[in-house]
Amino acid sequence: MHFRSNRFLSRRGFLAVAAGVAMSRPMRSARASAVDERTLRAAPGQARLTGADSAPTPTWAYNGTVPGPVLRLRQGQPVRITVENSLAEDTTVHWHGIRLPNAMDGVPGLTQPPIAPGTSFTYEFTPPDAGTFWYHPHADGLVQLGRGLAGALIVEEAELVAFDRDLIWLLQDWRLAADGRIAGGFGSAMDASMSGRVGNLVTVNGSASADQSVGAGERIRLRLANAALARMMALRFEGHRPVILAIDGQPCEPHEPEDSRLVLAPAMRVDIVIDMLGEPGGRYRVIDDFYDGLAYTLATLAYDKAPPLRAHPLDAPAALPRNPLPEPDLANAVRQEIVLQGGMMGGGKLAGVGGMMSGMMGMNMKGMAMPGMNGTPAWAINGVSMTGDGHAGMAPQFTLRRGVTCHLTIRNETAWWHPMHVHGFSLSVLSRNGSPVPHRQWQDTVLLAPKDTVECAFVADNPGDWMLHCHVADHQMAGLMTVFRVT
Ligand code: C2O
Ligand code: CU
Ligand code: CU
């Protein structure tokens, strides 16, 4: 159920936003035309990742904080965000998952010139969809994201949907050296050709194994965003039953995750609703156990001691209001196929390094020439490796006439996981390995397990050159990236 009146508001007064609903609603349309102005400054900074008294880790940060500030925008309200670059290298900001004009997409060399050190660039767009998104650099992405540049972007529903708490957890994965500094060696051949730069410390909103305070009886919306370079996550909520409300910002039919395990690949977002049916004063762990034998506590739900907010459990949660996504016309769709190739032990042919790939399986890798070494591309899409951030000059993989429906098949021939991300569109996910995907899911980041084939569809309603790439940053940099055009 949605809480649309004060009758349901928490007596603890958590809902500062909702508390103002009745008053602010008439003002909202007046405000809708006003431009929301924000500034983000990228600069070196510091963060205490393992607690207030831990040694500071030198990072790169937006507005001095890791992660960057949560940008809360409103659906349909124009925003102008000025990005100032105080780093020693070029940067840009990409608004991951937002359907916006191509010139605002933040891809250097493709949609805009890079923002040089000491200069700024102003992004202007009007978010059409409500939901959970995020922002990050799209220049030297492996290093800039790996040093901490990322933030959550929430687009609030035009019609407020209230919960007792609306929380965002931006998850980051750090590879720290023994001295607490970020380890160097970004883009090693090993990382590039295997699972990517998986780190050794995961933080929630910038701190490791943090407590999340909650109250018994509350109904909480928790927005999860995986901003890691490469780490896959599978979250379990001890003693609780999360219900998925949205994936990659787009509402779906509310449903419980398979095996009560929320799988979050890099760049994916999932909005869940959880009823806090635990004991006052109780502590419940949130565990990530994606990698066998490497489970750890990501965070703890720490209940305060107050008696339950509600005497009776609430009804099953209702679906969030749908976003205005264009409906694919499958009967008249144009078909395209994207084949993912390469990586260690892939058994697939990789253009240019095909010979090197064969016969590698089971061999000792030490001292061997590997794909990904010395800039050799480790990965390819349809036989072509687009590497680094050098997007200029790449011929589009395919071109779509504006307005046409594209029925896109993504086939993973490799032995690795790939969260495939498309800029500018949200994909209606039709099937996985031949089985229909339930709960009507729209995603901008589609996870493929080794050897998976996923079919999806989207309406090519937004003109421009758009990126399509794996969001494991090392894979992207080492060739798992392409561009398509809508004219
Ligand atoms: Cu979130 Cu091209 O990326
Ligand atoms: Cu994106
Ligand atoms: Cu990948």
Image (cartoon, helix red, strand yellow):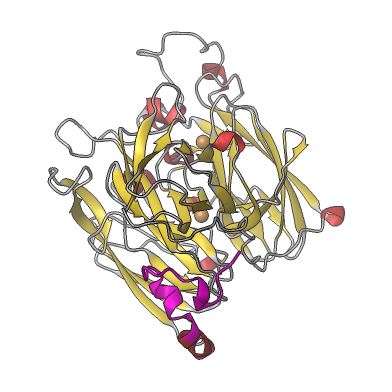
Relative placement, left or right, of 336 versus 134 is right
Relative placement, left or right, of 407 versus 107 is right
Q: Looking at the rendering, in which quadrant would you find the C terminus?
A: bottom right
Q: Is residue 444 visible?
A: no
The percent coordinates of residue 20 (x first, y second) are: 43, 81
The percent coordinates of residue 306 (x first, y second) are: 34, 57
The percent coordinates of residue 143 (x first, y second) are: 32, 44
The residue lying furthest to the right in this view is 331
Q: Is residue 64 magenta?
A: no
Against 440, is 240 above or below?
above
Q: Is residue 21 magenta?
A: yes
Camera-side residue of 186 and 219: 219
Q: How many marks?
A: 0
Q: Is residue 128 visible?
A: yes
Against 20, is 149 above or below?
above
Q: Find the magenta span and give its range.
A: 1-22
Relative placement, left or right, of 474 versus 89 is right
Q: Looking at the rendering, in which quadrant would you find the N terminus?
A: bottom right
Q: Quadrant of residue 16?
A: bottom left
Residue at 43% in and 41% down:
473
Relative placement, left or right, of 271 versus 319 is left
Residue at 42% in and 31% down:
192
